[in-house]
Amino acid sequence: MFNQLQKKWLAIKLITRMDKPIGTYLLLWPTYWALWIASDGWPNLHLFMVFSLGVFIMRSAGCVINDLADINVDGMVERTKNRPLISGLMTKTQAVNLFGVLIGCALGLVLTLSWPTVYLSVVALVLAASYPFMKRYTQLPQVVLGAAFSWGMIMAFAEIMGEIPLVAWLLFSANLLWTVAYDTMYAMVDREDDLKIGVKSTAILFNDHDKRIIGFLQLAVLGLLFTVGELLAFGWPYQLSLVISGGLFSYQQLLISNRERDKCFQAFLHNHWVGLIIFIGIFIEYL
């Protein structure tokens, strides 16, 4: 009995990527950017808990639906060939049930918010559920992922301010472009496998221009975030966070310079620090 429970827990942990929290971090930091700015400082405990838990739950649900969508191709990709649905650690029916439970938990959280935010959450669900299938139909699935990773920011402003100001859309745009940049690095890891099995990505679309386009996206992100700072009259702590982030982006360009799989993956993981540094800059501005 204990061994069965242990096996089930292991399957849940692996399919939701609890052992790989980078996706949670990349969702969490931008959400905190929006929460702090929309609240003009500290958000109340209820909102902090709802959005923090919501990030964790929706990221987990996104991982489950991603593995369900890729059940026929993950076994052909080196990085994903041992995922639970491929190894037999979890069945397809169990994965569908787990996805339903996670979405139910997310719904329970969002129902504690205002109705306009509840309506906006439907868009978040559609984006999260559709992203894994976009790689079959478009070379720009990372754009859909960027929208999914950024929609919580729109929800935060709508809930706290009762409106979605220009600053919210600038943050949304910055985070969307940042997501495309770092997920292209991630897709560079699988590019050879994806080409063989017919999966689409920006890494394939950008081809030999990948590093240059990622650099352009990173500059655009910094430009949009600088504009946010100017509109909010932020001072040197926030501006310093952008300078440091620019340095981190430069380091990532060095990592991907030879398009080595391990280095590209390292560059992707490194984006966690960008999100954290920018949050620290925003946090200090409101002290």
Image: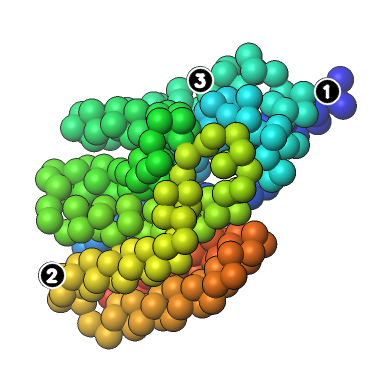
Mark 2 residue crowding within 10 angstroms, few (<14) / some (14–19) / many (20+): few
Mark 1: which secondary structure?
Answer: helix
Q: Quadrant of residue 227?
A: bottom left
Q: In the image, which disc is placed on residue 231?
A: 2
Q: Is residue 82 left or right of residue 269?
A: right
| Residue type for callout 3 | Gly
- Placement of 71 over or under 239, stated as above or below: above
**In terms of image quadrants, where is residue 181?**
bottom left
Q: Which residue is mark 3?
A: 100
Whether 240 is drawn above or below 230: the answer is below
Tell me residue 175's x, y (percent).
33, 56
* Disc nearer the start of the sequence (1/2): 1
Q: Are marks 2 and 3 in contact (CB under 8 Å)?
A: no
Drawn side of residue 137 relative to residue 165, left or right = right
In what element is the residue under mark 3? helix
Q: Nearer the viewer, residue 186 or 126?
A: 186
Marks 1 and 2, how far apart in space? Answer: 55 Å
Q: What colouring method underlies this structural image?
A: rainbow
Q: What residue would you read off at disc 1?
A: 4
Residue 233 left/right relative to 28:
left
